[in-house]
Image: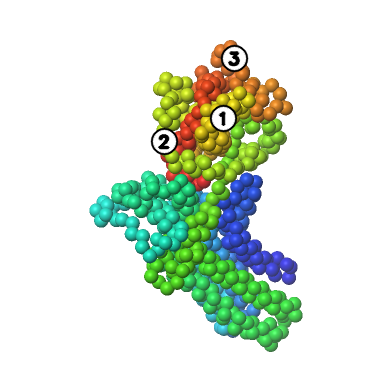
Amino acid sequence: MNFWDAWGTQTLVIVSLSCQVILTLFGSRRKNVTGLIGLGMRCFLWGTYLVATEVVPYSLGKLTGLRIDNPEHPDPNVELKAFLAPLLLLQLGYPDNLTAYSMEDNQLGLRQALNMSIIVMVVVIILIRCWNYTDFAILYFPMFLAGVIKYAEGIWALKFSLSLNTGITVKEIAQEKMVPPFPDGLRKIRGLGLVVKAYYRFHCLKPHLEDWIYHPRYISNDQLSIDNCSHREAFRITEIELGLMYDMLYTKAPVIYTKLGLFVRFASFFWLGVTLCAFSALEKSINPLAKITYSRTRSFSSFVYTYQYKRFTFSVLVLAFLLEAYQILLLPYSEWAIAKMSKHYNWPLVPTFLRIIAPRSAYKWRQWSDSLYQFNLLRYCLRRDWTRYIKFLNFWGIYEYIKWNWRLYRMGPVSLPENLKKSVKRGEWSFERYGVSANDEIRQSIKTAFDKSILVWHIATDICYHRHSDENESSERQCHSNNDETPDCRSGSKLISDYMMYLLVIRPKMLSTTTGSIVFRHACRRVKKIRRSAEITESQLADSIFNHVQSSRSSSLGHEQETLVTSGWDVISDAQGLARNLLARPDRWELMNSVWMEMLCYAGANSRSSYHAEQ
């Protein structure tokens, strides 16, 4: 008997269970880890998720060859191998914190339901072929129930996230459905109000659904409004809402924290516990030496295999039980659980428990990475493009992915400063606030296509950022001696500028633009044409762009391969004009920070909900 015949199925079970352990422990980490570590984490979890999906059907395929010819005197090795079939069903249910890896997984809920019916049928066939009259065969039933319930729970979560209606009905509008009032007894619990407000805002407005029509009274409801919140509270509420959106799309949270969901979860755990206890009690019945009188031709090695199989099966069962117990213990530590418990604050120990976990949820638990990806055009044009040596990977369709991700993660994300959160909350119109006239070139710069405006303002921001002579610094300090916002606005403008370029180059769907890659290539050609040497800094390149002299637009673009989108448009000339007008203003950084913030809000308001959900 070779190793694959003897231990092939068990090896696949170990692989499957190892994937479950990895997904259980690290599945939710991808939402708050960025940079190269985040990229590695996502690739690792993606591969683990795919392996966990594919290894179970292959394992069941190996088990279909099992059969007990004599049910009165069964082979204990076959009994133990057949027991792994319903145990594998348990692995197809996926952990609570990573039911789906992407939006496409949610959209395949109906197909997964069909796969479940086929796989369950295969497991039933395996158990029928291996049925016998021993006490151990009774364990097939509770293990099968635990596996089917767990598997069905995962399919339910996949279908639930995107299966809601696109809006409320006329009958629901007439009922004046409102958010329940916040209990007076819980108002003193620190942080609970933020969590509950975020939960009901998400529950009522459903930002993850495309074209969701919410109740008209939700807009004016004080319990859903954040107008009276400070910028920190408003930002934290939004963070919690994004965490709830992630849970809705990629985890089992929306189905677990319901009455039926809790019943299903504890039912699966109960039958798994029954199986573990019964297996421990019936362990002596799987005694290879007791079978020797029924099978004189069996070798001693087969008895050794039986003992090893028994130890292996029991260990796998214990590990599966511990994984389920660990996930159940984590159920109360969630915003979903806090919101549900706030409805039952009169229950014993609920207020005490909320006083412990509500402040942690509102102020300490990380909902995202708290950082922004950055992409700088000048830095990109200065770096050598080594990725041209791996263009052969384009045959497999992964060249562009590696190319852009490498350049992106070389620049790295930056932490989100506090002043940006304050700027998001302010929301005033920039040009009216700073007195920019209608005919001013600064105002004209945003009247072009959105992707062109981003590029022009990005280059102009870099020019202003790097052109800080002693004269400019002293005059700026004199004009802003009573204003402490200028340094924050300068760094904030640079940060948002690089983030908007990241969206334009790496995530163009978020900006709802179709010509972003065309205008980006045009800008790269123009900047590289100005760059005299590869050994210059970003500051020197910014000065070269600002001082670049060109006879006319036609001559400067005559040797380039023009397109219909970029014909007659020169990003360098527009950026120079905008930078000169901005440098002439003493309040340029406040104006630039406000304009960039409006661009960011415009991009968010005009992006489809499905693109936001994917990110």
Task: Report whether 556 appears left or right of 176.
Answer: right
Task: Give residue 590's position: percent from left, percent from top.
Answer: 50, 32
Mark closest to the chain's N terminus, 3 or 1: 1
Task: Give residue 97's position: percent from left, percent from top.
Answer: 53, 59
Q: Which label sits on residue 477?
A: 1
Q: Which label sits on residue 550?
A: 3
What's the CA distance linking mark 2 and mark 1?
Answer: 25 Å
Tell me the colour scheme of the image. Answer: rainbow
Identity of the residue drawn at 47% across and 45% down? 612
Q: Which label sits on residue 487?
A: none
Image quadrant of residue 130? bottom right
Give the crowd class for mark 3: few <14, some 14-19, many >=20 residues within 10 Å. few
Task: Give residue 245's position: percent from left, percent from top.
Answer: 46, 52
Report the mark closest to the observer, 3 or 2: 2
Mark closest to the chain's N terminus, 2 or 1: 2
Residue 543 in view (yes/no):
yes
Identity of the residue drawn at 66% across and 40% down? 410
Identity of the residue drawn at 62% across and 49% down? 38
Q: Amino acid at mark 3?
A: Gln
Task: Report whether 589 appears left or right of 81.
Answer: left
Q: Amino acid at mark 1?
A: Arg
Secondary structure category for the residue under label 1: helix
Residue 117 in view (yes/no):
no
Q: Which residue is mark 2?
A: 428
Comparing 274 with 129, the one in front is 274
Q: Residue furthest left?
A: 174
Q: Quadrant of the N terminus?
A: bottom right
Q: Amino acid at mark 2?
A: Glu
